[in-house]
């Protein structure tokens, strides 16, 4: 049916030009897969730098995660007809942030990369920096994905999610069999 949207399709920003992008759920999972691969590569680098000494897998993985992923504090509040979700994402612009909603699963991700290169006659300096996060939040209730607003202001992402209407209770009559 044209004009309707399922929860697995892209959501459209509802307000203002500083709204992050709503993306299809598949794109979020692709980003998560790429992030996991990056962490795995970095953890392997730690393993190799230690002379391939076994027994430190978890330590290497956590060190790689800490180095590559930023922790993003999230707050979910019940505001009557809406849920209000706030996430602290300083250093990210609206274009850097992607949001997906699938049922009660709200997925937030962001990525900023920068590179700096200096060259002189005797020295070359090249530094790359990546700042990224990925969070999945299970919402306490169903929401209407078509009536979702996201605004980024002063490093705080704020989502207003309209709670989905609960179906009315119905009575079902039992018919006797003949």
Image (tube, rainbow, N blue to C red):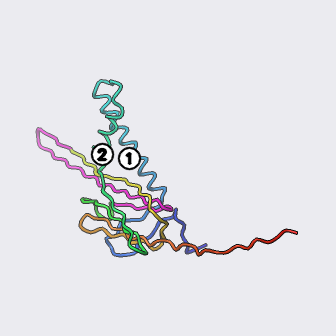
Comparing 59 with 16, the one in front is: 59
Kindly state the secondary structure of the residue where label 2 is placed: helix
In the rendered structure, the answer to whether residue 152 lies left or right of residue 169 reads left
| Residue 56 found in image quarter | top left
Residue at 43 percent across and 75 percent down: it is 81
Q: Secondary structure at mark 1?
A: helix
The span shown in magenta is: 97-126
Q: Is residue 172 above or below residue 41?
A: below
Work out how far the residue at label 2 is from the one at label 1, CA to CA, in angstroms. Answer: 8 Å
Tag 1 residue: 35
Report the number of numbered marks.
Answer: 2
Where does the image place residue 13, in percent across and percent down from the top left?
Answer: 40, 71
Residue nearest the viewer, comparing 157 with 29: 157
Quarter of the figure with residue 18: bottom left
Q: Which residue is mark 2?
A: 68
Residue at figure coordinates x 61%, y 74% from the top left: 169
Upstream in the sequence, badge 2 or badge 1? 1
């Amino acid at each position: 049916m044209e004009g309707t949207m399922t929860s697995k399709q892209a959501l459209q920003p509802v307000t203002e030009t500083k709204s992050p992008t709503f993306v299809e759920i598949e794109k979020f999972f692709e980003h998560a897969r790429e992030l996991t691969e990056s962490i795995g590569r970095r953890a392997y680098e730690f393993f190799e730098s230690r002379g391939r000494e076994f027994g430190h897998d978890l330590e290497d993985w956590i060190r790689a995660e800490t180095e590559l992923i930023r922790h993003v504090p999230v707050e979910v509040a019940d505001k009557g007809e809406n849920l209000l979700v706030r996430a602290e994402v300083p250093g990210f612009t609206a274009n850097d942030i992607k949001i997906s909603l699938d049922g009660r699963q709200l997925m937030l991700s962001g990525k900023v990369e920068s590179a700096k290169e200096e060259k002189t006659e005797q020295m070359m300096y090249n530094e790359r920096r990546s700042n990224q996060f990925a969070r999945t939040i299970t919402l306490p209730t169903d929401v209407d994905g078509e009536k979702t607003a996201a605004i980024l202001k002063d490093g705080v992402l704020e989502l207003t999610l309209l709670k989905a209407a609960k179906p009315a209770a119905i009575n079902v009559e039992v018919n006797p069999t003949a």
